[in-house]
Image (spheres, rainbow, N blue to C red):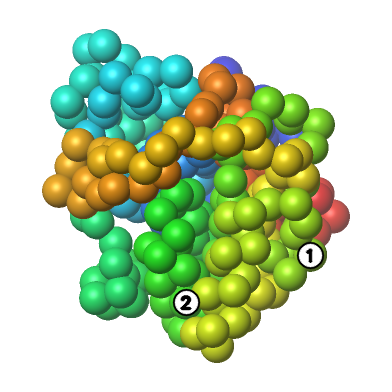
Amino acid sequence: METAFSRTEILLGRDALDYLAQCHVLVAGLGGVGGYVAENLARAGVGRLTLIDHDTVGPSNLNRQLVALHSSLGRAKVAVMRERIADIAPDCRVEGHATFLDGKNVRPLLAELSPDILADCIDAIACKVELILAAQTLNLPIFSSMGAGNRLDPAQIRLARLNQTEGCPLAREVRALLRKAGGSLDFWTVYSREAPRPAAPAQTSGTGPGGRAKTVNGTISYMPAFFGLWLSAAILRHALRVGGFSQIV
């Protein structure tokens, strides 16, 4: 009898699928990239997801985010994604935190949740760096998305360690802040080598309590999705290698 994961089992095998069902991945940020990461991990059979995002769905999210529908406008992104995953993989245990991560709360929250793997899909640089530093302090494997905004060419997307990225202004800023804080640059990132187009002037972005003034990037429907797919693949392949299934990946 076919099940939701019948095709995945053909590819990976029963033992690997059972292993993924025991994995716990934390996804920080449920925007254009993070929504695709969360959904792809659930569709691949990851058994536990913790989702963190302070924001609610706004009209400007409709061009690229899985959580964004006219019916979901004004709702918390974590709530919308939890419902979506429940409709895809009902056995996946999903915990949502409508929390704005910062230097004060990120380390104790990660220590309490204790995920196996962390997906960084945050776009605010200071928060991103705090998350990476906290993960490194706690020895949590972290996979990070760099800048998908202001770009159009998916052929320029790459997976590389942060210290090997090139042509990405966001990666450059993250590197500088991590060096200053004594953090490591030796972790996997998804980034684009394409030169970004100009952003809009800084304005307040976000409808949740963490709304802040920031530069607003231009976006297209498919680029954040590509970043999320690359990040999902890197996370799943890492999980399978850790689980002893290197022959698969």
The answer to whether residue 48 is visible is: no
Among numbered discs 1 and 2, the one appearing first in the sequence: 2
Question: Are dots 1 and 2 in contact, CB under 8 Å?
Answer: no
Seen as rendered, the residue at the extreme front is 201
Position of residue 66 relative to residue 50, above or below, is above
Name which residue lies at 45% across and 60% down: 125
In the picture provided, is 45 more to the left or to the right than 123? right
Lateral position of residue 87 relative to residue 39, left or right: left
Q: Nearer the viewer, residue 55 or 196?
A: 196
Depicted 219 relative to depicted 120: above or below: above
Residue 232 locus on image (x, y percent): 60, 44
Outermost residue toward the bottom in this view = 182
Residue 14 point in image, percent of width and height: 65, 43
Q: Nearer the viewer, residue 249 or 183?
A: 183
**Residue closest to the far right:** 247
Asked if one can make out residue 127 in the rendered structure from this viewpoint, the answer is yes
Vertical comparison of 133 with 84: above or below: below
The residue indicated by pointer 2 is: 133
**Residue 51 position (above or below residue 23):** above
Mark 1 lies on residue:
164
Q: Secondary structure at mark 2?
A: helix
Query: Residue drawn 50% across and 85% down?
Result: 181
Q: Residue at x 51, y 36 (%)?
A: 199
For the residues labelled 1 and 2, the Cα–Cα distance comes to: 18 Å
Task: Tell me the quadrant of the picture where the N terminus can be found.
Answer: top right
Residue 163 placed where, x, y %? Answer: 74, 70
